[in-house]
Image (spheres, helix red, strand yellow):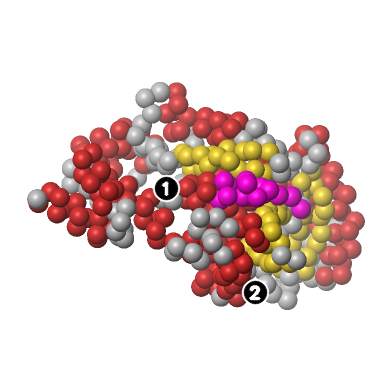
Amino acid sequence: MNDAVIGFSKLSKQEKIKLIAESYFSDPSAAISTLKNYWNSDEQLQKLHDEFIENTISNFYLPFGVAPNFLINGRYVTVPMVIEESSVVAAASKGAKYWASRGGFKATVINTEKIGQVHFTFNGDSHKLQRFFVEITPKFHASTERLTRNMKARGGGIKNIELRDKTALIPGYYQIHATFETADSMGANFINSCLEQFANTLKDEAAKRADFTETESQIEIVMSILSNYVPNCIVRAEVSCPVKDLADKFIDNPHEFAEKFIRAVRIAEVEPFRAVTHNKGIMNGIDAVVLATGNDFRAVEAGIHAYAARSGQYASLSHAKIENEIFTYWLEVPLALGTVGGLTSLHPLVKLALEMLGNPSAKELMEVVAVVGLAQNFGALRSLTTVGIQQGHMKMHLNNILNQMQATDEERQSVRKHFKSHAISHSAAVSFIENLRNN
């Protein structure tokens, strides 16, 4: 298609599919068939999915798996995970089982403060603006009373409102920097609604301020929006045990393993190239649970990676130490999550996932998510510092190769038998299957 599409959003779903198929595919009927194969046979459920976003033409499925045996603060939890990457659920499950026999995971929510900002410009005397801001702060609270009433009843609301002078960065640039508690909701709509009302109040009050010049009274609101960087919405997850108890069938010298493991973590603390991949392993676990529970994984990713760079250099989110012959491994991450509102009340599988977790509060969900990230990271580092990462990963990836090659049941048996005693690689698997077929 070389021309712009006019009025695409006004077309029916069938018309959109027809237009896309005929414009971009050499076999339009095959494209249409593929798209429709992923529709839900339940019309009401499909309608629900269609209305989550705009211009829906099909559903994109990801595997919904579970990782059992997570012992968190003395309670066993089976964790729902949505992810497409081989070995992630297996690694999380192994990490859970490993630590369940060594005291389990401890998790603590340190704080749940969320942030929103009104960005505006003011051209005038900053001292006058400061005095003005102090005087009208009660009006920010009064003007948002209708928005905060229900949130206050649930234990949330506006925590603090302050003026921040950013003129050293951009001439005339100031912020209303506000903090919020949103209880069990992620709170994006609540925060943004409060911020927009703050902006209206600021602008209206400035316009009638007697001691402002004409220029000073014309405050320009640039934007009002929450921040996904929540450095004071922190959860800590950790595991610990005597060094000697680290021994298992892969670890015959626990002291040597612990010291090598700590060196690997230390490398991620000082080397950004390693830290990014190290933290990606943590996010494999975190994102999978965030997706399964209907939360915003893009917001979580952005906030966590900003937190990892808060020192000015991107670094590891997890840390390890040995003190008095006790091995301890932990991480602290910012997680703004919700268990009410949004997809949590709409998507049937999200409801199921939350029920599987015992219908947790937002704080309890923060603990579960952080623990899965730590378990995933431990599993990856244990492999890296012992047998290597590829052995387990390629074993899981073998299924994908067999599916790509459309292997028969007989071929699958032969392939699995062969690679029990041979190194697995994509090329080796493909070559072995081709040899089977040629012979």
Q: Which mark is residue 72?
A: none
* Residue for point 55% across, 40% down: 68
Q: Which residues are magenta?
A: 95-110
Compare marks 2 and 1 and give the one earlier in the sequence.
1
In depth, the one of 22 and 103 nearer the eye is 103
* Residue for point 80% across, 62% down: 163
SS for dot 2:
loop
In depth, the one of 398 and 162 nearer the eye is 398
- Residue closest to the far left: 439
In the rendered image, residue 274, in percent from the top left (x then y), is placed at 52, 71
Magenta run includes residue 102: yes
- Say if 123 sits above or below 65 in the image: below
Q: Which mark is residue 84?
A: 1
In depth, the one of 121 and 247 nearer the eye is 247
Residue at the spot of label 2? 312
Disc 2 crowd rating (10 Å Cα; few below 14, some 14-19, many 20+) is few
Horizontal side, residue 64 vs residue 413: left or right:
right
* Residue for point 48% across, 47% down: 89
Horizontal side, residue 200 vs residue 376: left or right:
right
In the rendered image, residue 340, in percent from the top left (x then y), is placed at 65, 35
Magenta run includes residue 101: yes
